[in-house]
Image (cartoon, helix red, strand yellow):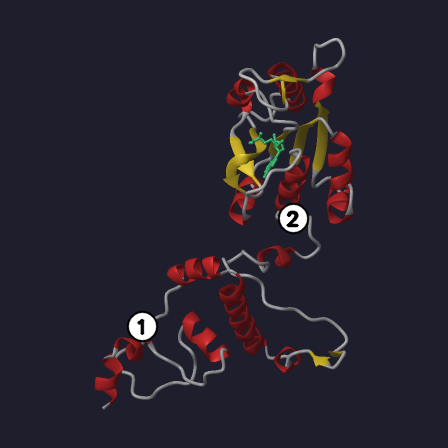
Amino acid sequence: MHFYVMTLFPELIEKGMHTGVLYKAMEAGILSLDTFHIRDYTIEKHKRVDDYTYGGGAGMLIQAQPVYDTYQAVLERLGDSAGKKPRVVYATPQGSVFDQAKAEELAKEEDLIFLCGHYEGIDERVLEEIVTDNISIGDYVLTGGELPALVMMDAISRLIPGVLNNDESATTESFNDGLLEYPQYTRPEEWRGKKVPEILLSGHHGNVEKWRLEQSLERTKERRPDLYEKYMELHPPQPEKKKRRKKKKKPQSAEGLTEGMAGEGTETSAEETNGTATQENS
Ligand code: SAH
C-alpha cells in the first residue's frame, strides 16, 4: 500500500506514521508514505495558500490552485504505472463516516491519496475536480484533516497482510463480524483478587470459543445496542426443528447464547416464544 498525503503539516503525518508497527511495516517495504506540502506548490509570492471567502464569513479558505498543483505532483510521482486514477480521499466532516467496512474497502487499493484541509476548508471547485471520496471520522469538527488522515491510514494499514505480526488478530477484532471483541486476559492468573475466568484455563477450544461468542454478544448488546440489533438481523435465532423429542440443553442460536449468559437458567426456544411448543410438548 502506498499512501500519498497532501497537507499543510507534513511533519505531523510523518511523525504519526513513523511509530510502532506502521514504522516497521514501512521499513519492511509493506507500506510507503509520501507527503506533499501544499505550500510548496503555491504560485503566490509570499507562499500564501489561503484567502477570504467570497460572500463573507469568518475564516480563511485554502485556494484551489495550490491544491490542484499538489495533486498534479502526486500523479507525477505515481507515474502511469497505476493505470487507473487513484482514489483521492478528502478528510471532511461533510463525508460519510469512516468505519471498519470502509477501511477494508480502501485496504484493497494499491495507492491512496489523502487530502487534508485546514482553516475553513478548501475551495469547492478543486474538490469537485479531484476528490473521489469524502470521508469524515465522526460528527465533530477538528482544526485539520491530518489526524483524520492518520486515523484512516492506521485502520487501513493494519489490514494489509504482514503489517501485524499475527494475521489472525486483524480478523478477530471488534467489528470484524459486526460484534465487539470479548474481554481478554494475560498473566498473572490472579491480580488484585481478580481471577481469569476458569474456562480460559481449561484448554477446551470449543468451550472457549463458545464463551467468547457469549461475551461478545453480551458486551455488544450492552455497549452498542445499534450494532447488536444489526447483528441479530443478520443472524436471526434459528427456529428449532419441529419433531424434536428431547429438549437439548445446548443453545441453538446466538440469542440463546446471550440468554444463557444472563444467568436466567432457562433456554427459550423459538417455538416456545411463538407459542407452538406448548401444544407440541403436551
Ligand atoms: N468549515 C468546514 C470545517 C473545516 S475544519 C465545515 O464546516 O465543513 C478544517 C479541516 O479539518 C477540514 O477541511 C477537514 O479536512 C478537517 N476535518 C475537520 N473535522 C473533520 C472530521 N470530523 N473528519 C474529517 N476531517 C475533518
The disc at residue 158 is 2
The disc at residue 176 is none
Q: Relative to residue 91, is residue 170 depicted above or below?
A: below
Mark 1 residue element:
loop
Q: Relative to residue 88, is residue 220 depicted above or below?
A: below
Query: Where residue 103 appears, x then y in whole percent?
Result: 56, 44
Q: Quadrant of residue 237?
A: bottom left
Residue name at image x 56 percent, y 18 percent: 56
Ligand 1 lies in which image quarter? top right
Q: Quadrant of residue 117?
A: top right
Q: Nearer the viewer, residue 109 or 272?
A: 272
Residue type at numbered disc 1 = Pro
Query: Where residue 265 appears, x then y in whole percent?
Result: 45, 85
Q: In this view, does 154 lie to the left or right of 88?
A: right
Residue name at image x 62 percent, y 17 percent: 52
The disc at residue 239 is 1
